[in-house]
Amino acid sequence: MKPFRVLMLSALTVVARGQAVDPREGPQDTSGLLHYAPAPPDNPLKGFVSYPRPQTGFPRSLEWDYIPLAAVMTGPTNFDWGPFERKLQQAAARGCQFIARFYLEWPGRSTGVPRFLLDSGLLLRTWTNTNTQPWPAAVDHTPDYEDPRLRTALTNFIHAFGARYDGDPRLAFVQVGLLGTWGEWHNHPNHQWFASKTVQRELLDAYEAAFRRTKLLVRYPAGPDHPRYADNSTRPLGYHDDSFAWATVHTGRSEDEWFFETLLRRAGATNKWRTQPMGGEVRPEVWHCLFDEPSCAPRGQEFDRCVQATHVSWLCNEGVFRPDFQGPARDRALRAARRMGYEVHIFRATTDRTDSGYTVTLWVTNTGVAPFYYDWPVELSALDVSGRIRATWKTDWKLTGILPGEPARVWQHHLPKDAWATPGTRLLVRALNPMPGGRPLRFANQEQDRHLEGWLTLGTLPP
């Protein structure tokens, strides 16, 4: 039989963020066009992130928290994962995936160093940390990071952590943490107490070996010439900017050489976002007023400018989760949440009918600022006129590598002709969140959720 083209949906134009799609990104004809609509701000693995709490009035798909190493490590090779497991379970029960950072020192809190190390004689330097703005100075306890007992304990922990949780769908990302104040890899202004490059490399090597599926992020981009940090520029690690919208965008001033984009440039890592995630935290000083008009962000560090410079996917930001956060500022924050990370838009879908069934072809673009970093399963489904799924097919389609501003990715899959192909049958597609109860990945299409929650309707098939 000569192939017969079935047109699935039609439209006069394809709209992406209000602009016509570049015709070079796909076929020239207008058959089977789908329609753009902004994806929701709580799409998974992106947007604004809260500390663990019951659902708030602002949409989110991620939670994060700090965990003292002492809470889970009870001996050199002994672990009680209960406290960490409860955090994962509670976040998952709220439909959120979790971002973890373990730490050893926190100004104003007791040490996070495991008790068995303290009992063995590990040195703790007690001092008053004044680098705690906007909060008051507080007593800090910095361990001797060069002590072999601590170094062995840290690598033991990392390997055990990865063995248990690498690839766990509840765990969205892991911040490397462990070293420095708040696990942020600095002891400013006492830099002489921070871990040597040798110790840093030991931890980075351990994390790389232990986590092959769950994505890792480290605080400071560093190339081979950085005076304080071990080279991480070619490692499979992303970065988190913990002073976002405060010290993010490169200024060219020598006193701002620690700014995030400046470090990315120096490390030769400005394109690392293409394969590794960028995250971070909005600087606490601007939590309460970042989305006011005018914003309180320092000049040159405006939110949109920082997003464009970093291609950030998610940001911890307690400011948007305040109960009184309402009105125009909240509306601007919702737009900002959508602005971050990926936005996958299917702008065309066609089906060719053949002797053996149907060949489905989709043209997929990314209208966001970053890719999606995990290959979640992508499935097709046949929905009958009563709203019942008649058949589902797994595809080999990959979400990773669909980059903003690049030509459309073409997905194609063959479906066997079977009893499901009855008059009025609809063809649907979804990217399956592997965490049970997790928020579905919604495509940036008007047809998303039209006939079945979590699925994008591609069109209607003939028998």
Image: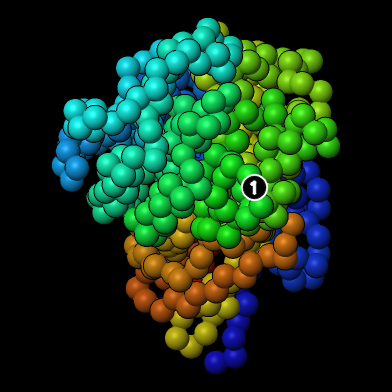
Q: Residue at point 38% right, 33% down?
A: 144
Mark 1 residue element? loop
| Lateral position of residue 222 relative to residue 236, left or right | right
Residue 304 percent location from the top left of the image: 74, 33
Q: How many marks?
A: 1
Q: Nearer the viewer, residue 454 or 301?
A: 301
Q: Residue at point 64% right, 47% down?
A: 226
> Amino acid type of disc 1?
His
Residue 124 occupies quadrant: top left
Vertical placement of residue 99 versus 288, above or below: below
Q: Nearer the viewer, residue 52 or 102?
A: 102
Q: Residue at point 74% right, 71% down?
A: 27
Badge 1: how crowded within 10 Å, few (<14), some, or many (20+)? few
Vertical placement of residue 280 versus 15, above or below: above
Residue 305 percent location from the top left of the image: 77, 35
Q: Nearer the viewer, residue 58 or 203?
A: 203
Residue 138 seen = yes
Residue 9 seen = no
Residue highlighted by disc 1:
226
Quarter in which the N terminus is drawn: bottom right
Residue 365 percent location from the top left of the image: 66, 58
| Lateral position of residue 6 relative to residue 114, left or right | right
Vertical placement of residue 403 versus 326, above or below: below
Residue 310 occupies quadrant: top right
The residue positioned farthest toward the bottom in the image shown: 1
